[in-house]
Image (cartoon, rainbow, N blue to C red):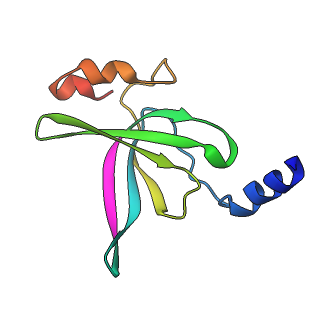
Amino acid sequence: MDKIIQELNTRNMKEETPSFAVGDIVKVDYLIKEGKNERVQPFIGQCIQFKGSGIAKTFTVRRIVQGEGVERTFALHSPRVTNVSIERGPNNKPRRSKLFFLRDRQGRSAQL
């Protein structure tokens, strides 16, 4: 049973995954289906965490929209995630693997 699951996981994983780290400002192009139409919607924000391993690996991106923090979690190997590109690296290299302390900050201090 384990071999079957492992084979399915390797078959559905993306061959090339983007290399970015926690703290980077990334642009995630996500495929959205609205009725019969499909379009790509970009989501630009700071990566605050990685979670999981293998095909179940996810990452969370946070951005501020009109003074409210918006977080979205994406599956790294999802066919809906068409492209992940690094807009810029962090100003300071983070010392933590999960940047949840940014949730409590306001304004410019909400970015690394």
Vertical arrangement, residue 73 with respect to residue 16, above or below: above
Asked if the stretch drawn in magenta spans residue 70, the answer is no
Q: How many marks?
A: 0
**Farthest-out residue, left:** 66
Left or right, residue 78 beside residue 44: right
Vertical arrangement, residue 7 with respect to residue 2, above or below: below
Quarter of the view holding residue 52 = top right
Residue found 46% across the figure and 55% down from its top: 84
Residue found 12% across the figure and 34% down from its top: 67
Vertical arrangement, residue 68 with respect to residue 45, above or below: above
Vertical arrangement, residue 109 with respect to residue 4, above or below: above
Query: Where are the magenta residues, as a range?
Result: 40-46
Left or right, residue 18 beside residue 98: right
Q: Position of residue 21 (x, y in %)?
A: 51, 37
Q: Position of residue 7 (x, y in %)?
A: 82, 58
Q: Position of residue 15 (x, y in %)?
A: 69, 61
**Farthest-out residue, front:** 1
Quarter of the view holding residue 61 = top left
Asked if the stretch drawn in magenta spans residue 41, the answer is yes
Residue found 62% across the figure and 45% down from its top: 56
**Most frequent secondary structure within the magenta stretch:** strand
Left or right, residue 20 beside residue 65: right
Q: Nearer the viewer, residue 99 or 19?
A: 99
Q: Position of residue 26 (x, y in %)?
A: 39, 47
Quarter of the view holding residue 57 = top right
Left or right, residue 66 beside residue 85: left
Q: Nearer the viewer, residue 10 or 96?
A: 10
Residue found 33% across the figure and 27% down from its top: 112
